[in-house]
Image: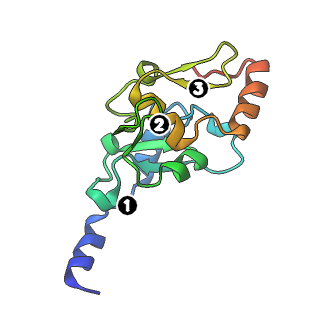
Amino acid sequence: MTSASVALAMSKKRVSTRQKQAVIKRAKGCCEYCRSPMQYAVQTFSIEHIFPQHLGGKSTLDNLALACQGCNNHKYTKTKAPDPASGKFVPLYHPRRQRWHDHFAWIHDFTFIIGMTSTGRATVEALQLNRDGLINIRQLLYETRVHPPK
């Protein structure tokens, strides 16, 4: 291992238990991208780095978000994606700097997320916020008055 790789590894501070708890509480137990509630998830949620560590993102509360496994996997290290309407690369939704309702809306039965801005549209497509499994669980949770999240 080179001295540069050792320095990089040492600079990647792990997310503490206290930080994880704070992120979950701040997100009210919902994925900050697709709004799925973690209490009904079949896979554990992740504390993800909004701006990836390999690009210099830090393990600080202002760079951490709660993400379901699907959103976390689709986002991976992306920070930009093409807007389907214009084809231009735009920044993905940033849960610490932007408000969800400014970029996304639900259709009438709250099962499908619509991107309302270039960032919203790019994020819906890049993270696949309307995956079949998500739509199915949203339908069930809506019928039981658990969805949409407050």
90 horizontally vs 116: left or right = left
Q: Residue at (29%, 53%) from the top-left corner? A: 57
Residue 78 lies, with reference to residue 24, above or below; the image says below
Tell me if residue 143 can be seen: yes
Estimate the spatial distance between the alpha carbons at disc 3 and disc 1, rounded to whole Å: 32 Å
Where is residue 144 drawn, in percent x and y?
78, 20
- Badge 2 crowding class, 10 Å Cα cut-off, few under 14, some 14 to 19, many 20 or more, is many
Q: Residue at (62%, 51%) from the top-left corner? A: 44
Between disc 3 and disc 1, the foreground one is 3
Task: Return the residue found at the far top.
Answer: 108
Q: Which scheme is used to colour this image of the protein?
A: rainbow
12 horizontally vs 114: left or right = left
Where is residue 62 drawn, in percent x and y?
31, 40
Disc 1 designates what residue?
Answer: 14
Quadrant of the rendering where the N terminus is positioned: bottom left
38 horizontally vs 84: left or right = right
Where is residue 93 drawn, in percent x and y?
40, 34
Question: Which callout, 3 or 1, points at the residue further toward the start of the chain?
Answer: 1
Residue 83 lies, with reference to residue 117, above or below; the image says below
The reply to whether dot 3 and dot 2 touch (C-beta < 8 Å) is no
For residue 113, the mark is 3
Between disc 1 and disc 2, the foreground one is 2
Where is residue 95 drawn, in percent x and y?
40, 34
Residue closest to the eye, 46 or 55: 55
User: Which secondary structure lies at badge 1?
Assistant: loop
Task: Return the residue found at the far bottom.
Answer: 1
Question: Which callout, 1 or 2, points at the residue further toward the start of the chain?
Answer: 1
For residue 94, the mark is none
Q: Residue at (33%, 44%) from the top-left corner? A: 63
Estimate the spatial distance between the alpha carbons at disc 3 and disc 2, rounded to whole Å: 10 Å
The amino acid type, in three-letter code, at marker 1 is Arg
For residue 123, the mark is 2
